[in-house]
Image: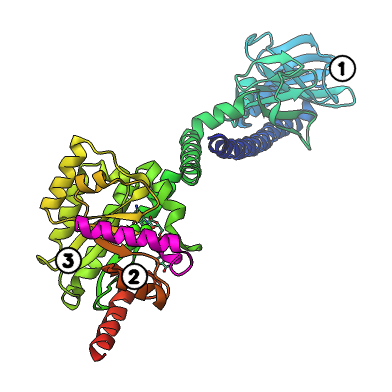
Amino acid sequence: MLVSLLVAMALPTIGVTVAALQARWQLQQRANEAANASITMLDQMLANADTSNNAVMQLAGRPCDGEARQMLQLQVATVPFVRSVNLIEHDHLYCTSLLGSTDQEVPAGSYIGGRLRMRAGNLTTPGVPIIIVRQVRNDRGVLSVIDGRYVQRALQFASDYSEVYLIIDSLYMDKLGKVRTIPLPPLPQARASITSAHYPYAVVAGSPDGSVLRYLLAYDLALLTLIGGVGIIGGGICYRLLGRAASPRALLQVALDAGQFEPFVQPIVDAATGQWSGVEVLMRWHLPGEGLIRPDLFIPMAERTGLILPMTRDLMRRVADALLPHVADLPPRFHIGINISAAHCRDPRLLDDCHHFLAAFPPDSIELWLELTERELIEPTEQTDLLFQQLEASGVKVAIDDFGIGHASLNYLQRFKVDALKIDQSFVKRIGADTLSAHLLDTLTELATKLEIDLVAEGVETAEQRDYLRTLGVRYLQGYYFGRPMPIGEFIHAHRHHRNTTTED
Ligand code: C2E
Ligand code: CA
Ligand code: CA
């Protein structure tokens, strides 16, 4: 859970960081472009003012007569951006294109570098900022005035997320055309500052705090949503993967879905004839990369998690599918033993599972044997009584597995109408070794004969054991001596071979 949460948070954090860096980079690009474009346009305007200054320079110091005014007005009319052109002498303005003769003091010191000045307004248009370009030769000169509204247009290259300021001396103009005294408002994000190469002014562009976030939200909302989604999905996948590995149930479920539980079969031999009269189905887990896993390692887990039911059902289906095409080659009433857990016995669906299995084969071609281990006997209740009656009616046989090491009473064997007892391997192993087990085996055979119950001996590994059990009258034998558990395909071949060799005998 913690790892998944971390993944769910780490992915968007990385994504948002990258997106924010990219947004900041884009804002920076835009600020650079805006400042450059403003400088180009402003330089152009100021150069125009210089053009008109040059054109009338020879009038400076001459009287402000009709001819002079006409020349000044000609500049205003023909040079773009220039609003008025004025003549000065000894820091006094004495002739304007607009009003003609006048006398106003225009001190040289108020012009930065003696060339440039910005004002928030003047006498003619108090609310409209102006920029004045000054040119003086021998105390006589010309002032050309540019309307601030043109200048404002040169500051329009800013985006919605940035500001552009024109700075001349101690004043600055913003993109709304307002002129104020520095300091500038702070522009901590994506700042670009460019000084003109031709005139004493600078342009500063940049964004106030929070602009990157606003930009991200406005332009990259889809991206942010995607990033969030990726985080949630990534976390989810992580949780699933880790969760699967963590829970045994999920692990088994994955294996079941992937068809990794395979039926192996081991021959059960008729002791009298040596014929292979049936098989016990033993489950194997074919885990990729791990090979075959023994059932004692995973059956207990399957029983605890309840998955043993679907696993057994799947196993029975696979056995039926694999054996059906070869059923004609097998002896009639061929036994197929299936190991059934106690939990399965308490489940009413067991009967359905058995019916399905039997229905897959032609009538009387096979016999279904359910092997219930003596180690965990099911408690006799009305419900189980009924189940066993129904199983009997359906022709399903019941065998008690690992008999001799548990505590099945005579009463129990009778009540459930058990058809066979599978003698536990430990007794077979001790044949010839001690007299006690020989005595136990004798008693067992006697009991079975009395109750008319068949006996199967498990774990037969030697000819000596086989002979001993055969003389005792044990009807069926099973063990490595006859054949190990094997895949069904292999069993079909082995059975064909075995049948041919026994008929030749
Ligand atoms: P089991 O039902 O007593 O099965 C007999 C076990 O003895 C099998 O072990 C078999 O391979 C082994 N065996 C057979 N002949 C010999 C022999 O001559 N010598 C020796 N030493 N061993 C022999 P396996 O296949 O490892 O199965 C172990 C147990 O797992 C089974 O014991 C059974 O209790 C359980 N099991 C296997 N498949 C299933 C299944 O599909 N469902 C359930 N519920 N349990 C299963
Ligand atoms: Ca068994
Ligand atoms: Ca057994």
Question: Residue placed at 78% from the left, 36% from the top?
Answer: 198
Question: Residue placed at 48% from the left, 67% from the top?
Answer: 433
Q: What's the amino acid at mark 1?
A: Gly
Q: Nearer the viewer, residue 71 or 126?
A: 126
Q: Position of residue 99 (x, y in %)?
A: 67, 12
Is residue 429 in the magenta section? yes
| Residue closest to the far bottom | 504
The span picked out in magenta is 426-452
Check the image and report above or below for 389 versus 193: below
Q: Nearer the viewer, residue 384 or 107?
A: 384
Residue at the spot of label 3? 366
Q: Position of residue 385 (x, y in %)?
A: 18, 41
Q: Position of residue 74 (x, y in %)?
A: 64, 28
In front: label 1 or label 2: 2
Q: Which mark is residue 109?
A: 1
Q: Secondary structure at mark 2?
A: helix
Q: Earlier in the sequence, mark 1 or mark 2?
A: 1
Per the model, the C-alpha gap separating discs 3 and 2 is 25 Å
